[in-house]
Amino acid sequence: MADFTSQEVVKIAAAARKLVKADLGGLNLKEAKLSGAYLRGVDLREANLRGAGLHAANMRGANLSRADMSWASLHAANLRGANLTGAMMGGATLHEVDMRKAGLDGADLSGARMYKAVLNEASLRGADLSGADLSWASLHDANLRGALLSKADLRWADLSGADLTGADLDGASLHAANLRGAYLIDTDLTAVSLQQAVYNRETRWSADGFDPIAAGAVLVEEGQV
């Protein structure tokens, strides 16, 4: 049983009180107004947060596995180190969200708006990011093995050191993206826009004769910006 009711959670958040490591698993918080709420380390597994307002909420280290956060507003929220395995976040607003080292394996982020999101060292294995806006996002050293990124907008994104092995990038735009040290093994790039994307000699491409320079990418040597 959850430690608080849905109504109590909303009242606590409205009063700017803190909820730390509380058990809120399975609560129905659909369209709840929780902007700025302090929910650090709380257990919200399988909770219904569909359409909830979580602008600038602090959910660092929270357990949101299998939670429904579809169409929720999480602009500038702190989800650093959070467990979002299997979470449903399709259509959510995640501009400038901090998801460093978050676990997002198998999460549904299709159509999510993630402009300037920070996902450094996050795990997104098998996640669905199809049609997502990840322009200017930072995905340094992120694990995107087998992720679905078809028609995703990754213009100017930082994918340095990211593992995109086996990812589906059909129709995605990586215009001016940073691919230094990225792994793109077993990744079909024939329908990907790579104009002005930068890479270095540590970048690993599929061993099928793919020519990144012919595709519009730019090789940069050590020391070059």
Image: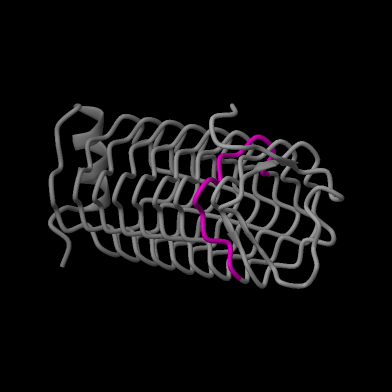
Q: Nearer the viewer, residue 173 or 44?
A: 173
Residue 2 on the magenta span: no
- Residue at horizontal 46 percent and vertical 54 percent from the top: 142
**Residue 61 as seen in the image, left or right of residue 35:** left
In the rendered image, the quadrant that contains the N terminus is: bottom left
Expressed as whole percent of the image width and height from the top left, the position of residue 146 reads: 58, 71
In the rendered image, the quadrant that contains the C terminus is: top right
**Residue 51 as seen in the image, left or right of residue 34:** right
Residue 164 on the magenta span: yes
Q: Nearer the viewer, residue 7 or 69?
A: 69
Expressed as whole percent of the image width and height from the top left, the position of residue 24 reads: 22, 57
Which span is picked out in magenta?
154-165
- Residue at horizontal 42 percent and vertical 51 percent from the top: 30
Rendered position, 129 above or below 54: below
Expressed as whole percent of the image width and height from the top left, the position of residue 8 reads: 20, 44
Expressed as whole percent of the image width and height from the top left, the position of residue 18 reads: 14, 36
**Residue 200 as seen in the image, left or right of residue 24:** right
- Where residue 156 sits, quadrant-wise, is top right
- Where residue 25 sits, quadrant-wise, is bottom left
